[in-house]
Amino acid sequence: MSAQVETPARIPVMIPWLGEEEAQAAADAVLSGWVAQGPRVAEFERVFAERVGAEHGIAVSSCTTALHLALVALDLGPGDEVVVPSLSFIATANAVRYVGAEPVFADVEPATGNLTTLTVDAVRTARTKAVIVVHQGGVPADVDALRAACADWDIALVEDAACAIGSTVGGKSVGHGALLAAWSFHPRKVITTGEGGMVTTDNAQWAQRLRRLREHGMNASAAQRHASSKPILESYLEVGYNYRMTDVQAAIGLVQLGKLDEMVVRRRALAARYDDLLRDVPGLSPVRDPAYGQGNFQSYWVLPAEDFPVSRDDLLAALAEAGISARRGIMASHLEPAYAGHPFAPLPVTERISRDSLILPLFHTMTYDQQDRVVAVVRDQARR
Ligand SMILES: *Cc1c(COP(=O)(O)O)cnc(C)c1O
């Protein structure tokens, strides 16, 4: 028998931090007999909205459906344009299509990967009704500047905060003061409910309509009807959707939310350690906090210089060979077949970041040893 080299365990790009507490909370929800949207969803909405500093939270099935409903709440439709970054998960642009409006791709700034007032202004037209700004990879966008500009232009600013729970702007949570913000609880994000999303807003009328829209446009929720001693004859006020979250998901979400601060501290510490270990590698710029806020490092991405000795894809291949799952950086939606033929202005920064950046593994339970293994491969490639 030939000797076998022991292959070390693969290092994934992300593992959600889930444990006994989440399992117990899910079991409690199941054993309560109420598994669809009910009291745990209501509690999760309350605690989540409070955490981000919003008046209302409306739990839904994903961030994609949260974005869709946010655009329905703004009454957007055919003939309207919505400015979005191409540099985002494709759901940001797709949500605009769901309401029949046109996504207009704007470029991003190199340092944060986010839209700015300048990049939005460059593609804005008389038909622009809204902007969806993405807090990409958890790096907060400069919402103070964007909110002021959008107010001047009389257009709505929706925030795609899918990755940004725990990130801050001026010491306040992302979502604080947002017109409408959309959040994700997919396992690739910082806290998870398996699948799940949330809309937050300070506007009571929108909140009421969003609650209705996620539940077939009904004027009374199933939970309200259940709780009432008298029969409630519901009616359907407009065409809605089934975008509900379940109580099993919300039970898990409540536990996850309780662990959020610890998760962000850990992610930031691991990101700082990457920074230290990679500092002397020439031609590698890691993502950093902007001057106006702090990120949660949902993604730790690095952008190699254009003369870096190996291409991004060779770097990914070398990492994969060493048992490390890194990922290409954020996608450029305008280059996907789904947007073939869709017009776009030049997007040089988007294309450069999307082509050359990569996301290194970072997860709550990551050990220094695992992190050292990642760094060793990157260093080795940088010397080629
Ligand atoms: C993940 C992600 C989404 C989609 O979130 P889901 O909850 O999976 O629908 C939308 N926008 C951005 C920026 C994301 O990263």
Image: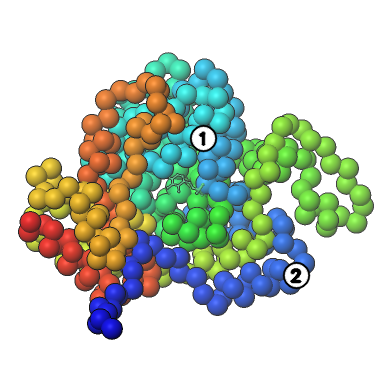
Residue sitting at the far right:
230
Disc 2 residue: CB within 8 Å of ligand 1? no
Q: In the image, what residue occupies the spot 86% across and 55% down?
A: 228
Q: Which quadrant would residue 337 be assigned to in this image?
A: top left
Residue extending furthest front? 1
Q: Name the N-terminal-most of marks 1 and 2.
A: 2
Q: Which residue is mark 2?
A: 32
Going 51% across and 75% down the picture, which residue do you hit? 19
Q: Position of residue 215 (x, y in %)?
A: 71, 43
Measured Cα–Cα span from mark 1 to mark 2? 35 Å
Disc on res. 95 = 1
Q: Position of residue 12 (x, y in %)?
A: 36, 64
Residues 52 and 109: in front is 109
Nearer the observer, 304 or 213: 304
Residue 286 visible in this rendered orientation of the protein: no
Q: How is the image coloured?
A: rainbow
Q: Are marks 1 and 2 in contact (CB under 8 Å)?
A: no
Q: Residues within 10 Å of mark 1 (few under 14, many from 20)?
A: many
Mark sitting on residue 33: none
Q: In this rendering, is residue 127 above or below 299?
A: above
Disc 1 residue type (three-letter)? Ala
Q: Amino acid at mark 2?
A: Ser
